[in-house]
Image (cartoon, rainbow, N blue to C red):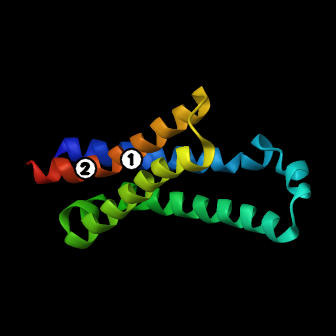
Amino acid sequence: MNTSISISLFFAGFFDIALFVFHMFFWKLFRWETQLKKVSTLNKGVMQVMNLALMVMFLLFSYLLFFEANNLIETSFGRTILIGIAFFWFMRTLFQPIFFGCKNLTAAAFIGIFATGSLLHILPIALFLNQ
């Protein structure tokens, strides 16, 4: 695997770790201790479990990118996994304006962040195909 591919995989893995860390702060950032008291027990549970599940996925993505990089690039199955992760971030990009709008700077910034995530995860495949 060439250096450009290795570097691109590292940045994709770092992106996923950064999102993991960001999600760790959701309880404080969004004041879930008080805000989730306003919703049903079911919705409170769903919100928190979905956040924890996403955190696990981000760790899994990072693990694959940092420790299984050769398999991700050099096997058809690995490239399929990498395309799947890129697709995850692409869909998250599309969901952002639908559910959060894009009328303020923060919402627009998140669209950019998630689009960057998609591009970071597809870049190693593009580099592999062009070598």
Question: From this viewpoint, is residue 1 visible?
Answer: no
Label 2 secondary element: helix
Q: Point out residue 45 in the picture as x, y percentages from the top left corner.
A: 79, 68
Give the residue number, with chain letter if any, for mark 2: 124
Q: Which quadrant of the figure has residue 47?
A: bottom right
For label 2, the crowd category at 10 Å Cα-Cα, with few meaning under 14, some 14 to 19 and many 20 or more, is many
What is the three-letter code of the residue carrying label 1?
Ala
Asked whether, in this view, residue 33 is left or right of residue 111, the answer is right
The number of numbered badges drawn on the structure is: 2
Lower sequence index among marks 1 and 2: 1
Asked whether, in this view, residue 26 is left or right of residue 55, the answer is right
Q: Badges 1 and 2: C-beta atoms under 8 Å apart? A: yes
Which residue occupies 26% across, 72% down? 77
Q: Point out residue 128 in the picture as x, y percentages from the top left corner.
A: 15, 52
The one nearer the camera, 64 or 95, is: 95
Which residue occupies 86% across, 60% down? 39
Give the residue number, with chain letter if any, for mark 1: 12
The one nearer the camera, 14 or 19, is: 19
Label 1 secondary element: helix
For label 1, the crowd category at 10 Å Cα-Cα, with few meaning under 14, some 14 to 19 and many 20 or more, is many
What is the three-letter code of the residue carrying label 2?
Pro
Asked whether, in this view, residue 126 is left or right of residue 114, the answer is left
Mark 1–mark 2 Cα distance, whole angstroms, equals 9 Å
The one nearer the camera, 37 or 129, is: 37
**121 shown above or below 107:** below
The one nearer the camera, 23 or 3, is: 23
